Structure formats: C-alpha cells, structure tokens
Amino acid sequence: MSAPRTAMKALVRAWWAFDLAWKGTPRHPPRLLVHAAVHPVITGFGGVLFFGGTMAVGIGRIYLPVVIWGLAMGVVIYLVAIVERKSMEHYGFLSRPTPRAALAPEDC
C-alpha cells in the first residue's frame, strides 16, 4: 500500500476518533438535523436567505457585499450539512445511497 493512501486512512481514522470523542456516544439525531443532512442544498439556500436577509435588513439596503456574505455563509452551511450527512451515514443513522451505475437497467 502506498504511503499517501496509508496516511489518508490514518487521517480518516483520526477524524472518526475525534468525532466520537467530541460528540460522545452516538445518539439518534433530531428530525430537523436529519432533514438538514438529507437535503443539504435546501439547507444551504436557507442559510443564504437567513444570513443575507439579516444583513440586508440590518444595513437597510442590498449591496454586493451583502449578497457575497449571504452566498459565502450558504456555502459554509451546505458544507456543514454534508459533513453531518457523512457522520450520520458512518454511525448508521442514514443508509448510504445506491449509485445509479450499480442498479440493473430494469431498475432505472
């Protein structure tokens, strides 16, 4: 096995050890968190609306920096939802989706 692959596996094991230590015993997540993890694009769009809207209301106008701020925070929330989805799949709270290439032609 190559050195980069071994290092990556060690990093993945370290990440899951850190995740387990940070969260403690894996417990079933609340429904809202499961919904956010299953639909990360909608969650990210909600972050865009919330953060961009809050800043626009606070400033009183919609400027380009307000739009950029909202989009940046939406991307951050989207990435957090993706990480939560991977965590839920790892601990068995969500099933891993079947790739479409693995399905038989009659199943599509």
Image: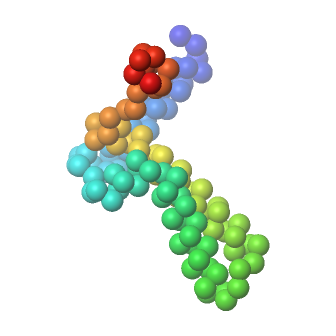
Instruction: From the viewer's perspective, tell me whether residue 62 is left or right of residue 19.
Output: right
Looking at the image, residue 96 lies above or below residue 32: above
Instruction: From the viewer's perspective, tell me whether residue 30 is left or right of residue 48.
Output: left
Residue farthest along the top direction in this orientation: 1
Answer yes or no: is residue 42 visible: yes
| Res. 67 image quadrant | bottom right
| Res. 2 image quadrant | top right
Q: Position of residue 100 (x, y in %)?
A: 47, 25
Coloring scheme used: rainbow
Residue visible at 44% across and 50% down in the picture = 39
Q: Position of residue 90 (x, y in %)?
A: 35, 36
Looking at the image, residue 36 lies above or below residue 99: below
Residue visible at 42% across and 40% down in the picture = 86
Quarter containing the C terminus: top left
Residue visible at 59% across and 77% down in the picture = 53
Q: Position of residue 87 (x, y in %)?
A: 38, 42
Q: Nearer the viewer, residue 32 or 23?
A: 32
Residue visible at 55% across and 20% down in the picture = 5
Looking at the image, residue 76 lies above or below residue 94: below
Looking at the image, residue 37 lies above or below residue 15: below
How many numbered callouts?
0
Residue farthest along the bottom direction in this orientation: 60
Q: Position of residue 48 (x, y in %)?
A: 58, 66
Answer yes or no: is residue 91 visible: no
